[in-house]
Image (cartoon, coloured by chain):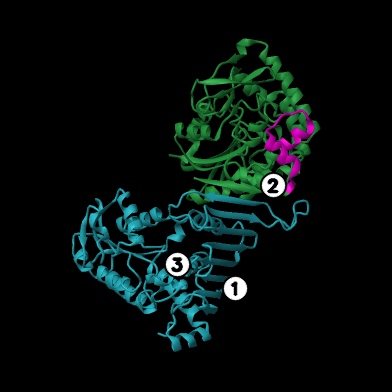
Amino acid sequence: MKRVVVSDDFDEIEIWPSESFIRYREIVEKEVKLFSIDGTNLTRVSCPACGSDKRRNGFDKFGLEYVECLECNTLYISLRPKKDIIDKHFKESEASEFWHSNVVKQTLKERIGHLFKPRAMWVANLTEQYCDEPSTFVDINSVYSEFLEAIDRLDLFKDKIIIEPLSENVKSFDERDGFRIIDKSFTDSSLGELGADAVTAFAVIDHVFNPEDFLNTSRSLLSEDGILFFTVRTISGFDLQVLWENSEAIFPPDHLNLLSIEGIELLMERCGFEILELSTPGQLDVELVLNAMEDDNKLEVPRFISYFLKNRDKDARRIFQEYLQQFNLSSHARVAARKR
Amino acid sequence: MGKLKVGIVGFGKMGQIRMNVINNHPDLSLEGICDVDSNGRSCGCEFYEDYMDLLEADIDAVFVCTPNKFSPDIVISALNNQKHVFCEKPPGRNLEDVKNIIKAEKENEGVILKFGFNHRYHGAVLEAKSIVDSGRMGNVLWMRGIYGKAGSTDFEGQWRSNKDVSGGGILLDQGIHMIDLFRFFCGDFPEVKSFVTNSYWDIDMEDNAFALLRNEQDQVAMLHSSSTQWKHTFSLEIYLEGGYIVISGILSSTRSYGHGERLITARKQFEDNSFAMGNPMEEITYFDQDLSWELEIEDFVNCIKKDKKVVVGSSEDAFGAMELVMKIYDGDSKWNEKSSDNDLGGFNQ
């Protein structure tokens, strides 16, 4: 298994413009409170990573409770909205519409340069290394057409499939764009075996009702030497550990499952995957904590962290961020895995 | 085919590394060890003092892990006894040794011969090779390789520092790995310029070699092989039309060439002024495990079981690497003059 560190140079505001992000959170909060009023919409779940029921209370966000698994330290929402409610939210809610038409549009150039192109290269490099003559690519819950265009430009895959797209601009893709769209739930049993050499799912596991089901389905879509690529927010990351309930970056239903690094390993093992890469190449942990301290001068963070961030310069923070990445302590994780 | 019965000749550091891999391999059974010392007597298999006795025993293959002086004769005898052979690098002390081995290989068709250039199987190297071969970063423009040893209190007393046994200094001992990697990425280099020096250690061979190699595609590789590095160092930079790849540190059993093996990749970004100029986004991959020994032996076993041609570590690779080593020695006229006067590590064949 290997780990990856990325040295890039971008700020929180470049991909999460503050005003739009605040507005997005407000809309999500309103919607979560609406579907939480009826208690029958909510259901209790075990740890989505290790399956344990041993837990302790974490904190409340938008009226839903985060609990921490005592076995693997994964943080997750339980009681959580039922699957159909979650699925509907990400397909047709006001929040979803606002995300695509505001946040994404405002930050598209930065997202292409800092996120989509590097992701496409990541997929290409590993697929070519591990698969003989890769031909089929699958993206689940596609949101960003620009990522798919970056994949297309690689000229690596003959058959490119989008399953259950979540944004209108991806839904408008057709065969002229070189993609085939299957607008069914990825858990739909009629999908069958696609024999994919690469399956990608970016920021999907964070919000699926059941990550184990998601991984089992993804596994069934893979060819014998195919690779699953996904990103997920991890509770093992610095900003989330330091800020905990004060983190504005995590809230339901966008982050139902904040798997720990150890939880990711256990879950992949349970689902029959061999991890090729488990990295946390996040860029923003240190900046997120610094920004939170600046936004709220009463915020309590450990003394050393406070001293460090107030008294050391950008270079020191950059090196610390790289250290976090190197030891899988940033909150943005990426995983590449194949069938065992 | 059942398990392959194998033996080991030479039970020093390399022999012991090979034994550990053999004992964990499902298709290999260690039947015998041969050494001039009694190191291998308690390893649970037959022990031999004479390698010919091992070669005449009921074995399919032999791992030759002896110092350079002894390897060629053992390899040739093994081939002539119809044993498949895995031989540690370097493949002898000079080009004549390799030619003799290749002659024996040709006379014993069907017998597999593989040389231990394990660096090609390191995770970072395999990934770099995959990126280069994909062509997505364009052609290789140039490479720069540094491989250096820190030295040690007993450096001058080791067999590697005895010219009669080793045949050459740091270039032949360690630099040959970097030369092999240059060949792995860019093929042969017909043109060589070099400086070879003995500047510190009291040995009758080189302790530093600096070389510039150029191939027919005008790709240039710069080599510095050193035993006066004072800190174990491995660095291979590969610059391509579209970016660069740097392998920094190489995993070893002692972790002395860095605590991790790192592969740095970056694409050139000067086409977009909105991003950091001259400071492209880098991705650094850390490799925690050295699987090179396992992968190398797996390939050897596969070649035997499936009667496949050896592609990595073939006798052509061994000859190619050895020929470049010789050209680097020969390329420095001052070194050649000194070596013929003082019996330094020259190769006046």
Q: Which mark is residue B218?
A: 1
Is residue A255 placed above or below B268 in the rendered structure?
Answer: above
**Quadrant of residue A81 in the image?**
top right
Quadrant location, the C terminus of chain B? bottom left
Question: Residue at horizontal 63%, vertical 48%?
Answer: A6
Front tag of 3 and 2: 3
Question: Residue at horizontal 78%, vertical 27%?
Answer: A23
Q: Which residue is mark 3?
A: B153
Q: Amino acid at mark 2?
A: Arg
Q: Which residue is mark 2?
A: A318
Q: Is residue B70 on the magenta stretch?
A: no
Inspect this view and state whether residue A192 appears.
no
The foreground one among B166 and B108 is B166
Chain to which the residue tagged by mark 1 belongs: B
What segment is highlighted magenta in the picture? A289-314
- Circle nearer the N terminus (3, 1): 3
Question: Residue at horizontal 73%, vertical 31%?
Answer: A99
Is residue B163 placed above or below A44 in the rendered structure?
Answer: below
Characterize the local packing of mark 3: few (<14), some (14-19) or many (20 or more) Cα atoms within 10 angstroms: few
Chain B as rendered: colour: cyan
The image shows residue B325 at horizontal and vertical percentages of 46, 75
The image shows residue A43 at horizontal and vertical percentages of 57, 15
